[in-house]
Amino acid sequence: MNDKENIIEIHGLKKSFDKGRTKALTGVDLEIKEGEFISIMGPSGSGKSTLLNMIGAFDKADEGSITVAGIDLMKEKHLDQFRSQKIGFVFQLHNLIPNLNVLENVEIPMLRTKTTNEEMDKRAMELLELMNFPNLSETVKQNPTRLSGGERQRVAIARALVNHPSIILADEPTGALDSKTTQMILDLLKDIHKKENVTLVMVTHEPDVGAQADRTITVLDGKVVEGKT
Ligand SMILES: Nc1ncnc2c1ncn2[C@@H]1O[C@H](COP(=O)(O)OP(=O)(O)OP(=O)(O)O)[C@@H](O)[C@H]1O
Ligand SMILES: [Mg+2]
């Protein structure tokens, strides 16, 4: 993997909240190669989600440098566009919209693109098929409230993939699931990572889950303390 380019490059990144009183990131240095599967571990409150949110440009850092997929996030003005084109995000609690059906939920990120309805349906179905749903033609018409936790997470993963992202950011994607469902979701993520060569950055507090990545780093008090490249 040494000949691959860095898709994520972070140096001296700092972020605080509450007018500087809460220091969430205190100087993160991190390089991630294109196509890598990396897991981020560390105690509660250490800054893992904040780091993921910086990579996905959900929030701006205070200091340091962060370049993701060739875009300098400290300078870039069109962060929404960057995010919808380059990033797929999977949250712990899936964040599906309860009053939209499964198909509509998966199509949300495509609504702002120039995709036609037919193309949206085709792409969403294609991805949901990858997620191995039994009775998919029925499932797509249901609201996510009727699905199990693992099924909802599979819908969320399909949604994260619709715009062919270069990077998937997953924040505790299996945190709310039992061990069997956890492995199924991980296998799906690993499969996509391999097939589509996407870079996968996953936060987890479960050592067994983290160990399945190519590389594990640990965040402590807002810094990467282990596994730094
Ligand atoms: N939007 C925010 N406003 C104020 N403080 C915040 C905000 N987001 C995070 N923090 C604080 O920044 C620190 C790091 O939080 P973060 O959510 O990144 O931790 P984490 O490692 O993801 O923890 P967990 O494992 O519990 O999810 C914590 O002290 C948290 O309270
Ligand atoms: Mg978190």
Image (cartoon, rainbow, N blue to C red):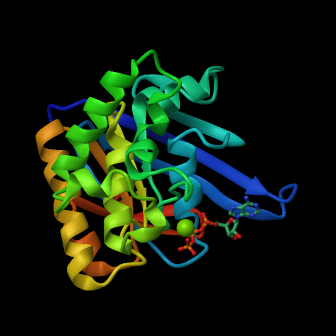
Residue 1 visible in this rendered orientation of the protein? no
Q: Position of residue 38 (x, y in %)?
A: 29, 56
Residue 146 visible in this rendered orientation of the protein? yes
The residue that appears at 38% across and 69% down in the rendered structure is 147
Q: Position of residue 168 (x, y in %)?
A: 36, 45
Above or below, 25 against 163 in this view is: below
Snapshot quadrant of residue 211: bottom left
Q: Is residue 195 left or right of residue 14?
A: left
Snapshot quadrant of residue 40: bottom left
Q: Is residue 147 left or right of residue 5?
A: right
Tally the marks.
Answer: 0
Snapshot quadrant of residue 184: bottom left
Q: Is residue 111 left or right of residue 178?
A: right
The residue that appears at 56% across and 55% down in the rendered structure is 99
Looking at this view, name the residue that lies furthest to the top. 114
Above or below, 65 against 176 in this view is: above
Q: Position of residue 19 (x, y in %)?
A: 88, 55
Q: Position of residue 229 (x, y in %)?
A: 32, 50
The residue that appears at 53% across and 35% down in the rendered structure is 66
The residue that appears at 78% across and 57% down in the rendered structure is 17
Looking at this view, name the residue that lies furthest to the bottom. 178
Between 143 and 45, the residue placed more toward the observer is 143
Between 46 and 100, the residue placed more toward the observer is 100
Quadrant of the rendered image holding ligand 2? bottom right
Looking at this view, name the residue that lies furthest to the right. 19
Task: For the N terminus, give its image quadrant.
Answer: top left
